[in-house]
Amino acid sequence: MHLYLTRQVIATLLMTVAVFTFVLLLGNGLKEIMGLLVNGQATVSGIVEAFGLLIPFVLVFALPMGMLTATLLVFGRFSADNELTAVRASGVSLLTLISPVLVLSVILSGFSAWINMEVAPRSRVAYKKITSAMQLKAISTSIPEGRYVKANNEFSFFVGYSDGIFLHDVLVTRVDTNQATDMFIHAESGRVDTTNQTLVVSLFKAKTMERENGLWTSGERGKMVLTVDMADSTNKNEEAIKLSDMTFPQLQQELTNVETVFALPPYSKMTHDQWKNEQRVMAQYKLDRSSRIMVEMHREVALSLACFGFSLVGIPLAIRAHRRETNVGIFMALILVFIYYAFVVIGQSLAGHPNLAPHLILWIPNFLFQITGAILLYKANRGI
């Protein structure tokens, strides 16, 4: 019975994962890639390579969805055909029967962790490099939003939000030849233009903290224009990666960078109240940027456990439904997937509100599904 049930689940799993992967590939790739092909900006080989690089990225979602659908379909048929009744009449408990499926879900969770934390981010970055080579991208993408970017050996940037044309909530740090910070600039908005290897950053409603002869002074400027020479920038490809496309080790390093860049300088020409105010502002910036990184780190780990949670809740629900129709199983799967990923979307959307602990919201669906699944399994095992 173990071998029979495992074969049924694996066969259905392969089919459902293939279907979900195909659908997600179309949704992610058609808008960007096919438009380039129609406009003559891409070759067929480039399209095939781009779609291939997208597969690990969509597997992050297709694998848990496929596991959930497979358990709902297999155990729904198993219950509807009275096979479960026959097994129980033979003295085999439900928990003993489904143990190989639960082991399979744990293995798939480990495989998902590897994909989520290492393979998918790297594949996504490679995919973006290919599509970037096929089209002329917006200039402002050279400074991605929501992360610390070292433009060259002198200037570093934080961008809170980019609408594709203007940058908003911009923080700039400048270091001297000894790599010691000698200027902080905060601007409400900005714009980026490029000329060859020169980045021209226009900042509006800018406030500065600048070190002169070892003393720090603050000031306000309506508009500032920074000319950044990109010729001496190091690791440009690495620096342009967004937080959502980083591997787990890269996110850990990014968190370390944030801790370093927001180290407060000693004050001298400012009053105590001015210093306290600047200290609160810098602490808030550090908290906001750290929160975004923490959300991405927890997202990669939390999503890895989706296979196990979906299996726990899918098996007893399929038995209770007692239906063998495929459309019923798919409908139930879509509802559960919507509930699960709704929490993920909420957590990511609240990344800029650290006081709400958005990184912990990402764990709610895992606890919810696993606790609910454990209770339902216990009742199903006892025939309640």
Image: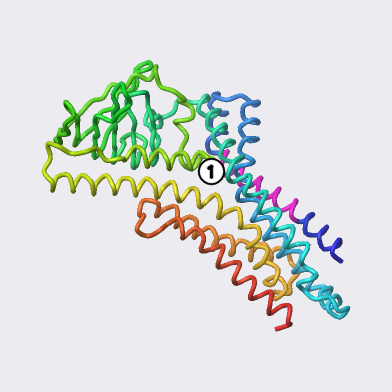
Question: Residue 94: which quarter of the image?
Answer: bottom right
Position above or below: 98 against 191: below
Q: Main secondary structure of the magenta part?
A: helix
Task: Name the residue: 15% across, 34% down.
Answer: 217
Q: Can you give x and y, in whole percent of width and height, for residue 367 in the image?
A: 55, 66
What is the three-letter code of the residue carrying label 1? Phe
Residue placed furthest toward the right: 90
Quickly name the residue at label 1.
248
Q: Position of residue 176 (x, y in %)?
A: 28, 24
In the current view of this chain or complex, which residue is farthest to the bottom?
A: 384
Which range is magenta? 13-30
Question: The N terminus is located in which quarter?
Answer: bottom right
The reply to whether the magenta stretch includes residue 248 is no
Please name whichever residue, 265 or 207, is drawn nearer the observer in this view of the structure.
265
**Would you call the spot at circle 1 few (<14 residues within 10 Å), some (14-19), or many (20 or more)?**
many
| Residue appearing at x 46%, y 38% in the figure | 242
